[in-house]
Amino acid sequence: MSSGLCDCFLLRRHGAARAGGAPGGQESRVLSQEALMSQDLVYQEISVSSLPETQNQAPPKQDPAFNTFQTSTLLIDSTNSSKSTVKSNEKKRNSTMPTSLEALEWSRSLEVLLSHHYGVAAFRSFLRSEFSEENIEFWLACQDYRGTKPATNVIPKARKIFSDYIGIQAPKEINLDSETREAIMHSLAQPTRSCFDAAQTRVYSLMEKDSYPRFLKSKIYLDLVKQGER
């Protein structure tokens, strides 16, 4: 309690005591009430003065590095979103029914045909009708094998391809000369991503010279060209 407040409090108490000894009960009661009110005001002043002072706090400053990080994150998210949209549109376009012009483009080469998802499906359906579907399946398996990333997956994939398509009496045996077959068999101990290249090239050449020209004259292909014109 400050000295000024203490003096004020003592004076009020002293005046109240003197008023109490004056004649007349009514006047005494009035003075007592004034003393009590003065005492309450002093207590209020003491309470208010004892409250901690509040200071205006300035808003926290944002770290420029955080702002840069936030902006970079938004840019990366925007870029990734754009790339995802492009890939999604490309995949959708590549898997939908081809137009007449797209189907006609397949007649340029087998490579163009196999670059289109629906073209692969149509050619595979045609080869199935000729009981030679193993050729396109082997070619696709080699494409997948060449793109194998972890080194630990190379050996099991290589052995799977050999047992399915190349080994003697394989369930989907392809037409290979003995020299190519033996070279692949010996490479299985330490297979590389190019160990099936010779066999894949041979099968591709076989499809290009034999199956592909017949596919261009087949009902499957001609119907696709007509449907694309609608």
Image (cartoon, grey):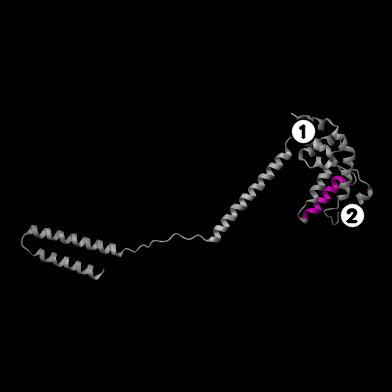
Q: Position of residue 15 (x, y in %)?
A: 13, 66
Amino acid of disc 2? His
Q: Tell me which segment is drawn in magenta.
A: 152-167
Of residues 52 and 80, the one drawn nearer to the viewer in this rendering: 80
Left-right relation of 121 to 76? right
Of residues 49 and 13, the one drawn nearer to the viewer in this rendering: 49
Q: Is residue 197 above or below residue 104?
A: below
Residue 100, which numbered label?
1
The Cα–Cα distance between marks 2 and 1, rounded to whole angstroms, is 47 Å
Figure quadrant of residue 46: bottom left
* Screen quadrant of the C terminus: top right
Magenta: predominant secondary structure element? helix
Residue at 56%, 55% (x, y): give it: 70
Helix, strand or loop under label 1: helix
Of residues 147 and 166, the one drawn nearer to the viewer in this rendering: 147
Q: Position of residue 28 (x, y in %)?
A: 10, 60
Residue at 30%, 65% (x, y): give it: 50
Residue 111 shown in magenta = no
Of residues 84 and 167, the one drawn nearer to the viewer in this rendering: 84
Q: Position of residue 69 (x, y in %)?
A: 58, 58
Mark 2 lies on residue: 186
Amino acid of disc 1? Ser
